[in-house]
Amino acid sequence: AGIITLDRGFKNTGSCESAITFLDGEKGILRYRGYAIEDLAEKADFLEVAYLLIFGELPTKEQLDKFYSDIQDESEVDEEMKKILDGFPKSAHPMGVLSSLTSALIAFNPSSVDVSSEADMYKAIVKILGKFPVLAAWTLRKKKSDPLNYGDDSLGYVENLHKMMFEKPGKKYSVDKAVINALDKLLILHADHEQNCSTSTVRMVGSSHAGLFASISAGISALWGPLHGGANQAVIEMLEKIKEDGGDTKKFMAKAKDKEDPFRLMGFGHRVYKNFDPRAKIIKKSADEVLGQLGIDDPVLDIAKGLEKEALEDDYFVKRKLYPNVDFYSGIIYRALGIPVEMFTVMFALGRLPGWIAQWREMRLMKEPIGRPRQIYIGEGHREFKNVDNR
Ligand code: CMC
């Protein structure tokens, strides 16, 4: 049996060895496979980063072309899936719909579960990379009552995603390059973050040898929560509330510091970063650029900047080393790109997909044992059973 140590929330427990993402929370460093996040966000595109995360090296042109063509070959979704989507009420949250659809995909692709060889694994990986953007776009189209569509093979991965989301029936699709660049950058910044809640979930579910799609579906559910990916939606809702309330940021700062009040400053704080989240720095700059390029003046950007300034100078936040995280400014960009608030966390999931895949693949290749934490039992000792009449 041995001694069991209690570590609530796994604050000090390494669950695996991994060669994918390096994170130094004290210094604010994030690298994928050794490459600085700043370089990747500036110079790479999302599909290259996906390849890098999953297979460990930046692809050559040939490798990238083959990868994308394999993904495109798998981008069709079974027609029956449309009926499942149809069954959801329009008010359904897109994250719930996406998690259900991802799980439903298994029924139409049963061979994706058995991944005893690397070739099988590769097939499952390109399938999910091909079908997931279609499902994500469809959840949005359903909300907007737009007819379901498919992508265009001549477009890149991210532009194709954008087209599937925003193409209007009867209109020729076109998009500002600045929009695709911004989207590419956001997806790259979200692509992996080592053993966070959703990634640990993907690994945990996958460790029972449930398939990749079941693992990803569970990861989507984990990401949904407002303490994790759902924070991007919560941030915009908070900023809007502050705006509607007259813009008094000090009042909301006081609420966030009040221990009796459950309100937290959404988009602030992080389990690992005790310094600037390097992703937040890039996103803040990008928010300024994108809004400028698109000629959008969003008053909540000023509220966000005001809140950040106050928090960085406030004893409560300084003492606890609470800095803006990746979700603080991302929603402002998503909104500028025309993405509805309820879809923000879906965008995060689209970005995180390669990370989940890479971690799942690494876990399977390293033949990790089934995940099975222990506990410290604090319940009753042995008790005599009484029949219902004698209780
Ligand atoms: N506003 C006010 N106080 C906070 C905040 C906040 N956003 N975050 C942490 N604190 C306080 C917390 O009350 C605690 O104070 P004390 O030591 O007096 O009890 C201290 O700071 C440490 O916080 P914790 O909750 O013990 O830290 P954690 O590592 O368990 O939680 C967190 C990390 C990200 C869940 C938390 O900071 C939080 O709830 N932030 C707001 C939600 C958010 O932005 N989440 C996105 C995280 S980044 C992207 C992602 O994971 O998807």
Image (cartoon, rainbow, N blue to C red):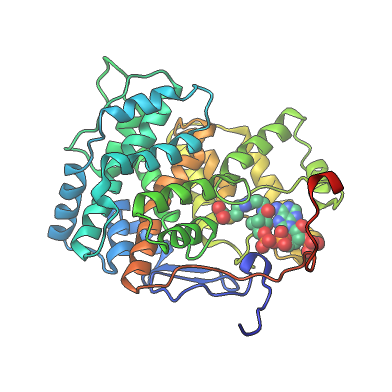
Q: Quadrant of ligand 1?
A: bottom right
Q: Residue 217, relative to residue 172: is it above or below?
A: below
Q: Is residue 225 left or right of residue 79?
A: right
Residue at figure coordinates x 38%, y 28% from the top left: 84
Q: Residue 68, relative to residue 133: is it above or below?
A: below
Residue 152 in picture, x, y percent from top left: 20, 33
Nearest to the observer: residue 348 or residue 10: 10
Q: Is residue 188 left or right of residue 201?
A: left
Residue at figure coordinates x 36%, y 49% from the top left: 213
Nearest to the observer: residue 7 or residue 300: 7
Q: Residue 88, relative to residue 385: is it above or below?
A: above
**In the displayed image of the protein, which residue is found farthest to the top?**
170
Residue 98 in picture, x, y percent from top left: 43, 38
Q: Is residue 381 left or right of residue 280?
A: right
Residue 389 in picture, x, y percent from top left: 83, 44
Whether residue 215 is visible to the viewer of this picture, yes or no, is: yes
Whether residue 311 is visible to the viewer of this picture, yes or no, is: no
Q: Is residue 297 left or right of residue 120?
A: right
Residue 235 in picture, x, y percent from top left: 63, 42
Residue at figure coordinates x 27%, y 46% from the top left: 110
Residue at figure coordinates x 59%, y 74% from the top left: 13
The picture quadrant where one finds residue 133 is top left
